[in-house]
Amino acid sequence: MPGVKQPLTRAELTDVVGRALGSAADLRGVRELTEGTFNAAYALTLSDGRELVLKVAPPPGTPLLGYEQHLLATEAACLRTFTERTSAPVPALVAAGLSAQGREYLLTSLLPGGSWHAQAAAMDDRQRRSLRRQVGRHVAALHTVTGDGPFGYPGRPGLSAPTWTDAYQRIIDALLVDAGRFCVDLPLPAAEVRQRLHRAADAALGVVTTPVLVHFDLWDGNVLVDLQRPEPVVTGFIDHERAFWGDPAADLASLALLRDIADDPDFLTGYAEAGGRVVLDCATRHRLHLYRAHLALLMTVETVPRGTTTPADAAWNRRVAGWLVQELDALDRG
């Protein structure tokens, strides 16, 4: 099936910019940002010199995963919260709302630099180690944001609960419902995946009692770095729309995608320097297997609605599916 991402026509783009900035906004330049597979995204240049990023969600009625409802409203709330309560580098929220077609939009500042993913080959080892230490410090700042409400996805009662165990299990159940709805070929029967993850969550997640705002998508594509300065610098974290209230250790899954965060001492050093606490004992490692399984399941299920099931995607999809099985097996051994 085709992906959910739907670019805007020039008329739609002009309408959204006018709604966000007023009719006097003078749009001088537009560049489509093509890396993402969910939102349409554009880098905008205004006549007053401002450089902004516009993200627009798929139209109403587009088949989405259960947790993907109102993602840009979630991101807007996260940006407000992180800006008000932390020193972490995130885009400044400019505007958020609905287009004439009922599509959610988000307008933010454009951060300097480019993604770590796109520039990784240009980094030497010294730069990489310095940047990972910076990432650790900034993630520790993100993790100072705590809440007193339910765990789970904000504003979505069906994916929230008073305890982290219950919220995690609801999130997993929703992904497995989505797998059936989109006829996703899972590497194991859905009932088996559910049983194994529920059993492990019951045993491991009760120790998490304070909701922390977790980004959950901090892979290298969402970490921006500037390599042109005398010393390279992390300029920001983007794409906060998948954030939820949960265990801060959950962020370690995407920060070490298909890897083990224990193999990233520079990140862990920076995280500790900024006050972050992570002890990689048996209990924490067990929770990390749960979060890596969650992320692997999500990445497997989303392949069908995103349209990333072509032969060119097959090797990566097999690797992610294998990651899910690997993490489930590790939980059983735990």
Image (spheres, rainbow, N blue to C red):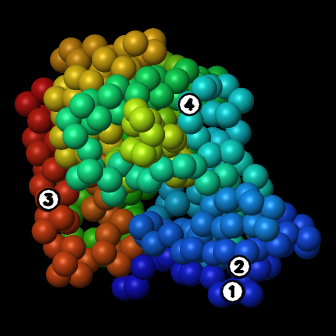
Mark sitting on residue 88: 4
How far, Cα to Cα, is label 3 from label 4? Answer: 32 Å
- Mark 1 vs mark 3: in front: 1
Q: Which numbered disc flags the more N-terminal residue, 3 or 4?
A: 4
Give amino acid for label 1: Arg
The answer to which quarter of the image holds residue 232 is: top left
Q: Nearer the viewer, residue 133 or 65?
A: 133
How far, Cα to Cα, is label 1 from label 3? Answer: 38 Å
Residue 205 shows in the view:
no
Rendered location of residue 129, percent (x, y): 26, 30
- Mark 3 vs mark 4: in front: 4
- Residue that carries the numbered disc 3 in the rendered image: 319
Q: Which numbered disc flags the more N-terminal residue, 4 or 1?
A: 1
The answer to which quarter of the image holds residue 124 is: top left
- Residue that carries the numbered disc 1 in the rendered image: 10
Tag 1's secondary structure?
A: helix
Tag 2's secondary structure?
A: helix
Q: Is residue 1 left or right of residue 139?
A: left
